[in-house]
Image (cartoon, coloured by chain):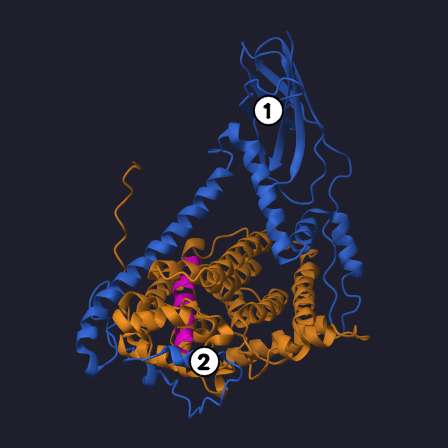
Chain colours: A orange, B blue
Amino acid sequence: MPPPGPPPEAPKRSRPVARYTPPIVPTLLRDYGLATRRYAEAYLARQQPAPYLDDLVADYPRRGGKMMRPALCIAAARACGAASADALPAAASIELFHNALLIHDDIEDGSEVRRGHPALHITHGIPLALNAGDALLLRALEPLLDVLARPGGYGPAILAATRTMARETVEGQALELGWRATNRTDLVPSDYLTMVLKKTAWLAFIWPIQLGIAVATGGRRTIVHPDGVVRFGFFLGAAFQIQDDLLNLVADDAYGKEWGGDLYEAKRTLLLIHLLGSATGADRRALDRFLALDRADRTPAMAREIASLMEAHGSVAYARSVALALAGAAAHEFDAVFGHLAPSPDKDFIAGLIPWVFERT
Amino acid sequence: MLTDDDYPRRKFRPDTGRTGSKRSLDAFTPPLDEPAQAQGQGVSPPPSPNHSDIQTEISGLVGEAVRAGYDVINENLRQGRAAADAYSANRYKLGEATQDLNKLGKRLVGLSRELSTTWFDLLAAAVRDPDLQAALQSQGHQGHQGHQPPAAMPPAPPAEPVSIAVEIRGSTNASGTATPLSPQARPIHPVACALNPIGASTDLPPIERVGFGATPAGGLRIIVGVPVDQPPGRYQGLIVDGESGATLSVITVDVHA
């Protein structure tokens, strides 16, 4: 029998979250996003583009996007005392890496739309899209390679953070794909949160902040508590992902993805996990039949019926409430991690991402 | 309710009939600037007058989800600390060192294959290898347009390998050597691994007491504690960089009959 562990930590008090996104958030998303895009473009543009490759590699990055990840990296660096220019290589690498994974994710998920346009594998086929994703994954390395040679570089800290992020991300993606491949119906919220920590939070929030801090400190000083960064990134990432799952049920053109894509793909979202735990009788049988089908066999009528069941069984309300509660936890962690830093627009930006999670399209 | 007739093979997806966006904060969430209603409960669920029974249930479930969130992140951090501890010199269980490093190496190889074959090889090499850094400086921007070259190279490290003295304590029938330490461009954090038997006698007990000291001239000295009853044979172990896992030196100890 294993020795008794410490009692579970009581959930910390959720602090109120600012209701509206402060103006600094869209401002810095635009400014830092534009600077990152320009910097990354130098790694996408080729004087003699390779046929069937370079145009595909540059496709997703040039479609735009919210640029949240690179902006968060730059803001974290500046909040800790670095200059924007010093953080641009890391920010560009983050954005390119994110786009490379999107190419592969769209193939793995069978997604048809990305940022309002057909997914790359829809327009060019899976083999070419896969190859472009591989190439972009390598291209994402180049900005970091260029700065690793600088004196006083932050290479070891960035390498350690990147290694961890990469491991967590692929493990998270494997969990999600594996659950669908094996039609798991016994999952609980903690399973979902574990998957979200790995698949979403590490790449989207924890890693960008870690890289920004590494740029500012060279990995040699401790300005903010590293565990606190992980906690903050996790709670914000979990709220972000749940909200993304909810947006998928009300998607329109601004969302840039297809309505109900998560349902068609039978993604084990928090909504679906709640419904699996709540639905009984005929509702549960209908849900089980739906999940047992292949993606191509799931019709719009079926998807909308499952969405209706989610509403009727309170799964949507539950997911909304959990997202808000986790956002409250993120706000609590933000105070613990960044509260001692001097006031700055960048610090406000990071805090402002918490309500922004719920306002983004 | 779904019936079996609803399950023909899907060929085309009809228009979804989208209307305007519903994704304002007000549409999705209750007022966020109201204080959390109860400790550990997060915020209250949004109004849903037709599902009051569900509301009550949700209040409890949300608290459980937040608690699960803290459990998940605490466990992740605990695992991270345990991994870090395993590679710190103070808490390293010397007998498991070589095996753990092998596992780490295999895991990194597998990981790099999952992402790309060169990501981490190149990163690790760029961090450690001054020659590669110089090459990157001169070659790194070919093919890029409008990008400023990086700053100058850091000062070159000493060119000559540094010898490492090996001091044997305990047994008087043992002698040892260590391969010279290659010049390092960056500070290192040497970690000593246990010395395992090599050759035909691999079932012999390892030599686990390996420590560090300094020579009078300020050089590095490896102190190996060889038990007086250590079976004769040849034993080898590694000095590795605790941060990168790179091998710094190989220690060889011969225990004579």
Residue, disc 2: A299
Amino acid type for the residue under numbered disc 2 = Thr
Of all residues, the one furthest to the top in this rendering is: B257
Question: Residue B145 magenta-drawn?
Answer: no
- The Cα–Cα distance between marks 2 and 1, rounded to whole angstroms, is 63 Å
Picture quadrant where residue A114 is located: bottom right
Above or below, comparing residue B227 to residue A301 in the picture: above
Q: Nearer the viewer, residue B156 or A183?
A: A183
Q: Position of residue B30 (x, y in %)?
A: 28, 80
- Judge if badges 2 and 1 mark residues of a common chain: no
User: Which of the labelled discs sits on residue B49, or is there none?
Assistant: none
Three-letter code for the amino acid on which mark 1 is drawn: Leu
Residue shown at the point (68%, 54%) measured from the top left: B117
**Viewer-side residue, A218 vs A159:** A159
Q: Magenta segment: does it hold A244?
A: yes
Tell me the residue that label 1 is attached to: B195
